[in-house]
């Protein structure tokens, strides 16, 4: 009971200090961010599904899409850990639909897609991850966002690591580190150093691995999550160097770390378990643990070494043959993925060209329509003015005829009056002459 209380207190304290590494990129209120940060500190814990449901319900109730985004970003890591990849894809698809086109939350968009791509690489869907990374890089270049470029190069580095191209992987990680510094995203820099160190361990370049592990550890007082990740990297380094005393001490420290189970994925923990049991001479237990690894290539590689240590050379040879077949199939898969990526990129380029052409056509159509409408309006005005002028001329003509008729009528009246006046004078003259007689 006391340990549970201690664990809860430690996780809560880590969650409260997580602001340094888990950035409030969506600018949500402080209480909501603290709940989200607590979930991020234990990203693979099944309890995050309840937290995600609670945040999503609040988002629906308040009409706040940012709460929904936080909820979905907490859900899909758990779906990945559970192997429920269909629901993982569905959660990311909904999250992308909420974030696409929103420049104000682009940093969270890049961060979330980067995490999703990591899982795609882990489950062998590197072609999907590569397409996402290239799309992320194009968008970041268009909008001049170094943070997006950093995440894109980091994913490409992971893909090259999956393909066992160590030098290419390191080159991409270091390019990501340069963009990380340009974006002032120092919280991501130690993670990149750890990835470089892990790559050097696989290549058995131990001094370089030690150098980059130390670089990452320089940040652990500022970013609490780095301490656990650096310990995992050191355990891998000591195991590769066969420094068993340092490896056992680091392994014990990890298992005493309450964040280890929720910060390392299942295969990462199982691989360390296999190495620990093997180093202790517990070969049968290590063999049983190796069977629990989800990646066939890792299973064959570990079991080949274990059977060789046990002297079961037929079984070791069988595992080696399966490992070679798996590597061959991986190589063929990589070639097919490259073709699929190239085909998808070409199709996307064609679609973008068609969209651009259609956009130009629409713009031309709108321009022509505007010109036609302007011409029709102008002609209508001209016709209306011409008709008005004709009507005015007709009215002037009719008014002139009326005026002339009135003048003629007036002249006729004047002539009649003059004639009547003459007649009156003649009658008066006759009358006066009659009276005199």
Image (spheres, grey):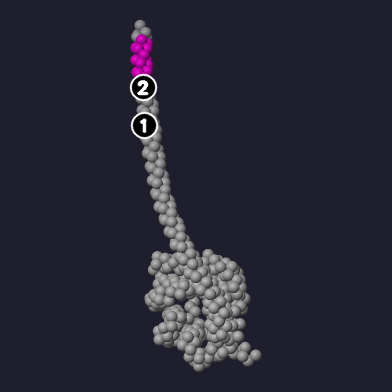
Q: Is residue 174 left or right of residue 17?
A: left
Q: Residue at x 45, y 58 (%)?
A: 347
Residue 430 lies in the magenta stretch: yes
Q: Is residue 118 left or right of residue 407?
A: right
Q: Quick one: label 2, few (<14), some, or many (20+) residues within 10 Å?
A: few
Q: Is residue 241 left or right of residue 11?
A: left
- The answer to which of 161 and 314 lies nearer the viewer is 314
Residue 136 lies in the magenta stretch: no
* Residue wearing tag 1: 393
Looking at the rendered image, the quarter that the C terminus falls into is top left
Q: Residue at x 54, y 74 (%)?
A: 322
C-alpha separation, residue under disc 1 versus residue under disc 2: 22 Å
- Farthest front residue in view: 314
Q: Look at the picture and state if 414 lies above or below 141.
A: above
Q: Position of residue 35 (x, y in %)?
A: 56, 79
- The answer to which of 288 and 57 lies nearer the viewer is 288
- The answer to which of 235 and 282 lies nearer the viewer is 282
Location of residue 419 (image quadrant): top left
Q: Residue at x 35, y 12 (%)?
A: 426
* Residue wearing tag 2: 408
Q: Position of residue 421 (x, y in %)?
A: 36, 17
Decide which of tag 1 and tag 2 comes sooner along the chain: 1
Looking at the rendered image, the quarter that the N terminus falls into is bottom right
Q: Residue at x 45, y 75 (%)?
A: 164
Q: Quick one: label 1, few (<14), some, or many (20+) residues within 10 Å?
A: few
- Farthest right residue in view: 1
Q: Position of residue 166 (x, y in %)?
A: 43, 76
* Stretch of the chain drawn in magenta: 407-432
Q: Is residue 383 visible?
A: yes
Magenta span: chief secondary structure? helix
Q: Secondary structure at mark 1?
A: helix
Q: Look at the picture and state if 239 lies above or below 292.
A: below
């Amino acid at each position: 009971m006391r340990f549970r209380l201690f664990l809860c207190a430690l996780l809560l304290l880590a969650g409260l200090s997580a602001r340094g590494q888990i950035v409030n990129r969506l600018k949500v209120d402080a209480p909501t961010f603290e709940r989200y940060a607590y979930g991020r500190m234990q990203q693979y814990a099944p309890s995050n599904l309840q937290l995600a449901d609670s945040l999503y319900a609040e988002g629906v109730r308040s009409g706040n899409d940012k709460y929904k985004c936080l909820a979905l970003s907490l859900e899909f890591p758990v779906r990945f850990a559970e192997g429920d990849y269909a629901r993982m894809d569905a959660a990311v698809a909904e999250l992308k639909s909420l974030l696409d086109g929103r420049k104000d939350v682009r940093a969270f968009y890049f961060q979330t897609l980067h995490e999703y791509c990591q899982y795609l690489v882990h489950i062998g869907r590197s072609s999907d991850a590569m397409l996402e990374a290239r799309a992320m890089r194009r968008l970041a270049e268009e909008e001049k966002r170094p943070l997006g470029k950093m995440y894109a190069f980091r994913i490409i580095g992971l893909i090259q690591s999956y393909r066992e191209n160590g030098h290419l992987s390191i080159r991409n990680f270091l390019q990501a580190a340069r963009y990380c510094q340009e974006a002032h995203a120092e919280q991501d820099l130690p993670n990149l150093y750890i990835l470089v160190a892990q790559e050097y361990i696989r290549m058995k370049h131990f001094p370089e691995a030690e150098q980059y592990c130390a670089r990452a550890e320089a940040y652990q007082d500022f970013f609490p999550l780095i301490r656990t990740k650096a310990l995992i990297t050191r355990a891998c380094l000591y195991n590769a160097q066969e420094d068993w005393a340092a490896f056992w001490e680091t392994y014990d420290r990890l298992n005493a770390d309450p964040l280890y189970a929720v910060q390392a994925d299942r295969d990462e923990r199982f691989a360390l378990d296999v190495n620990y049991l093997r180093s202790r001479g517990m070969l049968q237990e290590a063999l049983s643990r190796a069977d629990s690894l989800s990646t066939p290539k890792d299973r064959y590689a570990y079991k080949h070494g274990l059977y060789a240590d046990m002297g079961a050379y037929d079984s070791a040879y069988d595992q080696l043959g399966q490992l070679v077949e798996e590597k061959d199939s991986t190589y063929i898969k990589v070639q097919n993925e490259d073709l699929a990526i190239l085909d998808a990129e070409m199709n996307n380029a064609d679609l973008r060209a068609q969209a651009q052409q259609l956009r130009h056509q629409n713009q031309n159509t709108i321009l022509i329509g505007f010109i036609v409408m302007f011409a029709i309006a102008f002609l209508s005005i001209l016709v209306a003015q011409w008709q008005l002028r004709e009507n005015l001329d007709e009215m002037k003509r009719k008014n002139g005829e009326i005026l002339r008729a009135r003048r003629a009528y007036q002249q006729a009246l004047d002539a009649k009056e003059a004639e009547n006046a003459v007649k009156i004078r003649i009658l008066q003259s006759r009358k006066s002459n009659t009276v005199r007689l």
